[in-house]
């Protein structure tokens, strides 16, 4: 088994993708929790600090897996033979299918925050924009992982 074995690269990519999805899920839950703690002043309480610590830990986890994914994808793209074996038609099909849920996830995030703004002050446009980007990325990679695993 050599280091550039397509099967090893593919299994590593899926393992890193799974870690990314898990880390990002925890990050998103804590991201929105911290946002809703803001107006009640809970962010300055011990519970708020615990949520912040968890948020930072989850960010470290998903960033680690994102960097590992980027490293694997770089290795795959450097070698055309391996790239063709790993990024086969099935993988490309799963990647194309994953865009639709990602788009719906980003739109749904905007709609939910718009509805929440009727009862809670959502005035931070940077939070809304970053939430859309992060949720869209999370849903894309989650859908890609689920489609690939189901195939």
Image (cartoon, rainbow, N blue to C red):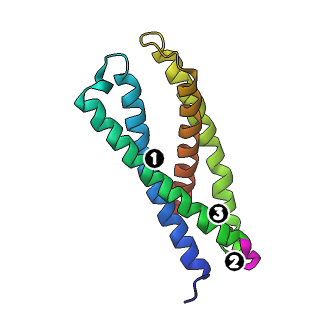
Query: Where 15 falls versus 81 (above or below)?
Result: above
- Secondary structure of the residue carrying tag 2 is helix
**In x, y percent, where is residue 84?**
73, 73
Mark 3 closeness class: few <14, some 14–19, many ≥20 residues within 10 Å: some
Q: Residue at x 29, y 23 (%)?
A: 42
Cα distance in 3D space between marks 2 and 3 = 13 Å
Cα distance in 3D space between marks 1 and 3 = 22 Å
Q: Residue at x 42, y 42 (%)?
A: 27
N-terminal label among 1 and 3: 1
Query: Where 7 falls versus 16 (above or below)?
Result: below
Q: Which residues are magenta?
A: 78-82
In the visual, does 21 lie left or right of 106? left
**In x, y percent, where is residue 97?**
65, 50
Return the residue nearer the eye: 109 or 122. Answer: 122
Mark 1 closeness class: few <14, some 14–19, many ≥20 residues within 10 Å: many
In the visual, does 64 lie left or right of 93? left
Evaluate whether residue 151 shows in this view: no
Cα distance in 3D space between marks 1 and 2 = 28 Å
Residue 81 part of the magenta-drawn span: yes
Query: Where 146 falls versus 124 (above or below)?
Result: below
The residue where tag 2 is placed is 82
Residue lying at the far front in this picture: please name it: 44
The residue where tag 3 is placed is 91
């Amino acid at each position: 088994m050599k280091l550039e074995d397509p099967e090893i690269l593919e299994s590593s990519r899926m393992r890193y993708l799974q870690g990314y999805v898990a880390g990002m899920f925890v990050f998103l839950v804590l991201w929105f929790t911290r946002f809703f703690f803001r107006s009640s002043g809970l962010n300055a309480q011990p519970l708020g600090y615990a949520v912040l610590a968890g948020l930072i830990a989850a960010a470290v986890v998903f960033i680690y897996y994102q960097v590992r994914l980027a490293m694997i994808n770089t290795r795959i793209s450097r070698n055309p033979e391996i790239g063709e074996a790993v990024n086969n038609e099935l993988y490309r099909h799963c990647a194309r299918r994953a865009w639709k849920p990602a788009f719906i996830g980003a739109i749904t995030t905007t709609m939910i925050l718009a509805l929440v703004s009727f009862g809670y002050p959502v005035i931070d446009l940077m939070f809304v924009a970053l939430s859309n980007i992060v949720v869209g990325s999370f849903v894309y990679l989650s859908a890609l992982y689920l489609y690939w695993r189901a195939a």
